[in-house]
Amino acid sequence: MALAKISLEEWIQTATAQAVSFTDFCVEFQSKELELTATEVLARMEGMLSVMEESIAAGLKGPRSKGGLVGGDAQKLQRYLAGKQQNMLGSFIGRAVAYSMAVGEANAAMGRIVAAPTAGSSGVLPAILFALKAEYNVKSLDLAKGLVVAGAIGMVIASRASLAGATGGCQAECGSAGAMAAAAMVSLLGGTPSQVGNAVAITIKNMLGLVCDPVAGLVEVPCVKRNAGAVSQAIVAAEMALAGIESVIPVDEVIDAMDSVGQSMHCSLKETAQGGLAITPTALALTEKIFGNKI
Amino acid sequence: MNIFDIIGPVMIGPSSSHTAGAVRLGNAARAILGEPVAEAVIGLHGSFAQTGQGHGTDLALVAGLMGWPTDDLRIPQAFDYAKETGLKYVFKNINAGDAAHPNFVTFQLIGRTGNESQVAGASVGGGRVVISEVDGFSLEFTGEFPTILTLHEDRPGAVAEVTGILSRRGVNIAQMRVFRRNKGGLASMVLETDQPVDDSDIAAVTGLPLIRSVRRINAIS
């Protein structure tokens, strides 16, 4: 079903003209759309946040995945970072990357997660939001507002491109999750509506063309580490946007470019496990090990 | 589409299409049968057959048949619970042809009181599903709305009678389609409504002269 295209630029202009923060604009706009009060919408989002928080904790315990390809790396990274006086990631990115892998590993181990926007990319938003909570003291109600901002950005992307790896490759899943998280970060840290748009545009531009090539068709390799990559891209884009750096290509056009790249992408690179990493000799050997001669 | 389609659903991993969607297909099949499932033959096609095991698709389908939601923490142990509750299931790989969706499944179900149903459908992405066959009728509905499924005689007035009853009871029809096996024979109506449909609505529709039977499928959360 084709959805009517939503223009993020129009939302940015409206929020700017009304002199409200992009966060407040999204909360009010989405509450109206849902015919709910802002309090009701935020309460539902706080419910999502508690599931996200639990999924981080579950993943940090190091569960093994269903297919057996992933598990324990979030814990490994967390322990490594905790034991170093100095590390290249720094505390915010280090924490966020460990959290994103934790949720990815919990998901792969059949743990409970929030698909946001999808299960395969479910690590990105919890990672960013709970890193903001730990490192910037962002309150729970504001994190819930951040989820509304992220969801609103996801709606724009769904209307102009896609959020499904089978339709648009991993750029549509981890790329979109990164863009949604970047928007939430910029908005919660006091960025202007146009800075939110720039963060979305920059994240997507840096992840454009990313293929979906899961080994054995499972949401394990490379999905967990791609969540970590998306987190770092989102943080880079958010800081650039907050510094006032602008995307030369306007955000709606960037999203449309993601759609056209997704359409040009060969189907072997869109969640079919017929190309990319999924057909490397090692991946094929692992596939046979997991499924025997079933594939 | 609304914001909770993007942020959500809350689900047991790892895949919205292969796990959450599989639960919902099981939920829909159980609702169509209309009673707890005693025996199930589950046919897996395409990607469901090839990679389903690694995604817990088999566990998710059985969990769905037991009526569990997509975020039920017991899903990884669904087979153990099925054994305890006396649900017998068997999986087989099927080939539904190239035109079939890659995540396609068929159910042959027998209920506790002996009712039988055949249901087929697909998980089409993001946890959304489409039911495409019920008891030999090719049809189409998503389970996102409260749904009424009729078996009726293909004669003038059948549709008007059903829609008339629903309008008098304040139930708005969001989508509806009519399917028939052959002209003048048995037909089926799928009505997706904005409001929940209660027992008295179903009883009123069931009492109509051209209606043979009516089933209700509550919206899948």
Image (cartoon, helix red, strand yellow):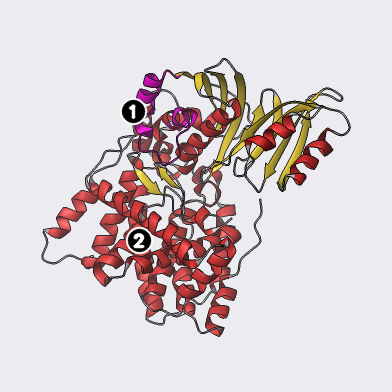
Q: Nearer the viewer, mark 1 or mark 2?
A: 2
Question: Which chain hosts label 2?
Answer: A
> What quarter of the picture does the N terminus of chain B occupy?
bottom right
Q: Main secondary structure of the magenta part?
A: helix
Q: Label 1, label 2: how many angstroms apart (C-alpha)?
A: 31 Å
Q: Amino acid at mark 1?
A: Lys
Front position in the image: B55 or A20: A20
Q: Residues within 10 Å of mark 2 (few under 14, many from 20)?
A: many
The region drawn magenta spans B60-87
Give coordinates of residue A280: x percent, y percent: 38, 39
Please check the rendered image and state whether residue B83 is part of the magenta-colored stretch, yes or no.
yes
Q: Amino acid at mark 2?
A: Val
Residue at (35, 61) in percent of width and height = A231
Residue at (43, 66) in percent of width and height = A203
Q: Is residue A258 visible?
A: no
Residue at (37, 25) in percent of width and height = B81
Question: Which chain hosts label 1?
Answer: A
> Mark 1 highlights which residue?
A289
Identify whether B136 is placed above or below A116: above
In the rendered structure, find residue A231 and report the number of the disc placed on it.
2
Identify whether A214 is placed above or below B75: below
A125 relative to A3 in the view: left or right: left
Give coordinates of residue A229: x percent, y percent: 35, 58
Tell me the element at label 1.
Answer: helix
Q: Earlier in the sequence, mark 1 or mark 2?
A: 2
Residue at (77, 32) in percent of width and height = B179
Tell me the element at label 2.
Answer: helix
